[in-house]
Amino acid sequence: MERAARLAAEAAAGRFSRELSHTHRGLELLQTITMAANQATTIGQAMQIAVDRISAHTGWPLGHVYLQAEDGSLEFVPLDVWHANDSARFADVREATQKTRLPVGTGLPGKVFNTGRAVWIRDLTAEENFPLAEMFQDTGMKSAVGFPLLIGPGVVGVMEFFSDEQLEPDEKLLEIMTHLGAQLGRVIERQQAQEGLKRSEIYFRRLTESSLDLITILGPDGIIRYESSSIEATLGYKPEEYTGKNAFEFVHPDDTPRVLHAFMEALQKKGNTPVLNFRFRHKDGSYRILEGVGNNMVADPAVGAIVFNSRDITERKRLEEQFLQAQKVQAIGQLAAGVAHDFNNILTAILGYSDMLLMQFKADDPHLGHVAGIKQATVRATALTRQLLAFGRKQMLQPTVLDLNTSISEMDKMLRRLLGAGVDLIAIPHPQLGRVKADPGQVEQVILNLAVNARDAMPRGGKLTIETNNVRLDEDYARQRTEVKPGDYVMLAVSDNGTGMTPDVRNRLFEPFFTTKDKGKGTGLGLATCHGIVKQSGGHIAVYSELGMGTTFKVYLPRVEEGVNISAGPVEESTNLPRGDETVLLVEDEPMVRELGASLLSKLGYDVLVASNGRQALNLIHADRGRTIQIVVTDVVMPEMGGKDLADSLRIISPKTKVIFCSGYTEDVASLRGDAGASIIFIPKPYTMSVLANKVREVLDN
């Protein structure tokens, strides 16, 4: 009896010892795998360690791992982690498994996912829901065990093992594997977080490096801790040349106090700073204009600095200044042209009455000189209004195809007299110069104005060079100057070696009434007029100048392929005006001009009818059907009905009546284009009585 009790006790002790040893080895396995997996740098390494250690512990010949797909689909993806004690034996199984994604609920991983617990398949031959079951059976596998890899209660992966024996469930092993699954799940979670963080760092670093903006990390002391690689393209520095320097060393001295003040204010409050513009030194020594905004993250232990995003806006600022300058010039030009337009009517009246008086006085009349003085002053005023209209691009142009070399050659003697003996005039004409289409008189005015300015910039004499050439202004040039269209141009360059000019003077050069000359020595309209003439002719004018180094003006006029027109030259005025007896209808809303024109034409023998607008003129025509009106002289813009509408009506009711238009405003002429095309007959205001009389006779005779 005692012996039986002793044997039972010894057997129980043996079982306990074996269970204790089994439990100890299980805990040792759990500890070993957990420590090794925690030291792994990737999920794959951690899983490989676990599969190898478990296979060695259990003696199972084949082990493998599935992870849940990261694309959000409810599928398990085979991880290329295997333990196979005979690689040749399991080669086909491994290759087939690596190509198979298992939906949730399918196969061993699917069953583990559904239950959230370990699944033990005692007999693979009796398992219906198991892809590749026959292939595994062909390798001799009879049993399979799947353990969940858990993050919290969620299954994120499955570790599966296969045995060539039919195994009964081992509850102790299952318990250990459950703990191990939780530990490995945490390893997966940590590794996924680290890999996600690494991917995020790579992603944002690449974003930062590919950004055109500058991203600067500034310490509270103003030292640059980090700079994006875009600094090289923007400011010429490599990031490593820039990092560690004090950012304020690169700020323009005039902007430093303002930037420092903004930086100190930014340190006092969290969040974004106001937008700041300042000049920053390029590696080549020039300054670029940066616009940026900062974010105070000094209190954030992960950053501990101010993050400053900035971009180069130098080009944008230049374009803004060009646009503002163009707007200012346009506004002043509109005002000047409007004044000139109204003034032309007054000048027409003064010129006309002067002519009428001159026609009445005899050569020895003591008042003749006074009237001649009035007319001379009026002519000077007329020239001034033309300059104002030229600046505002509203003048009347009579474009023709020109050879600029010929124009310069014909002006040579006049230019040499104008420049004086102290200035050496040199002409460099291009031998095969293209043609331009422009008003010959206006082109001469441009050359004269540029030559006079060059002369005045060389008070002690010097060299004036006039050069012509064929050029092409490309897309890059046009991008730098928004008002320029790419294409073929003829260039006229006027260069001097005089005093040059400062950037401030250069920026205001084409403003009307701006002049650096002494009072009484210039109106300030010369270059403004040149600018207006060139622009109205479809061209572009540029200036290059440095103080003490001289100045070059370059005029670009569009090149044309037409032949040069031969000019008949100006018509000389005469006091012996042509006469006639035809009926003339004079339509003019300005009373003085209307009365003056009617008086002159009546004295020359014409039968004159007058009207103050187109509507009144039509009423006159309808009221007197028996009278034939051979010619109508009409202003363009008038109240109730203008000259264009009047002419349109005349083409219907009196198609043989000829029409002469009068205006001092180029936009008035533009409004006439249409059915009449280029065949319109036009007298620009202000005009003399001689011009009016000759034009009426010329149109009637033709």
Image (tube, grey):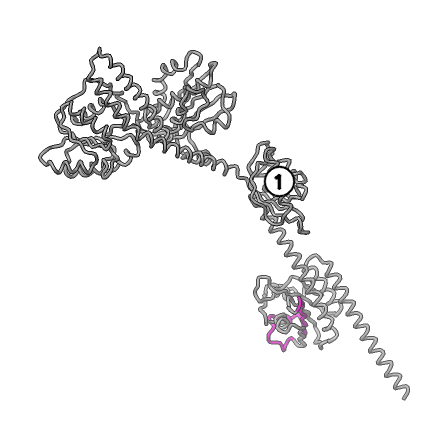
Q: Residue at x 68, y 65 (%)?
A: 185
User: What is the count of numbered marks?
Assistant: 1
Q: Is residue 151 magenta?
A: yes
Q: Is residue 10 left or right of residue 324?
A: right
The amino acid sitting under disc 1 is His
Q: Which residues are magenta?
A: 124-152
**Depth check, front residue: 1 or 230:** 230
**Depth check, front residue: 62 or 467:** 467
Residue 214 spot, x, y in % from top left:
58, 43
Q: Is residue 61 left or right of residue 496?
A: right
**Depth check, front residue: 627 or 483:** 627
Which residue of the protein is positioned furthest toward the front in this rendering?
A: 366
Classify 10 Å Cα crowding around label 1: few (below 14), some (14-19), many (20 and above): few
Q: Is residue 618 magenta?
A: no
Q: Is residue 394 above or below residue 360?
A: below
Tag 1 residue:
261
Identify the image quadrant of residue 396: top left
Identify the image quadrant of residue 690: top left
Which residue of the protein is positioned furthest toward the right in this rendering?
A: 2
Identify the image quadrant of residue 90: bottom right
Residue 340: tell me if it is visible.
Answer: yes
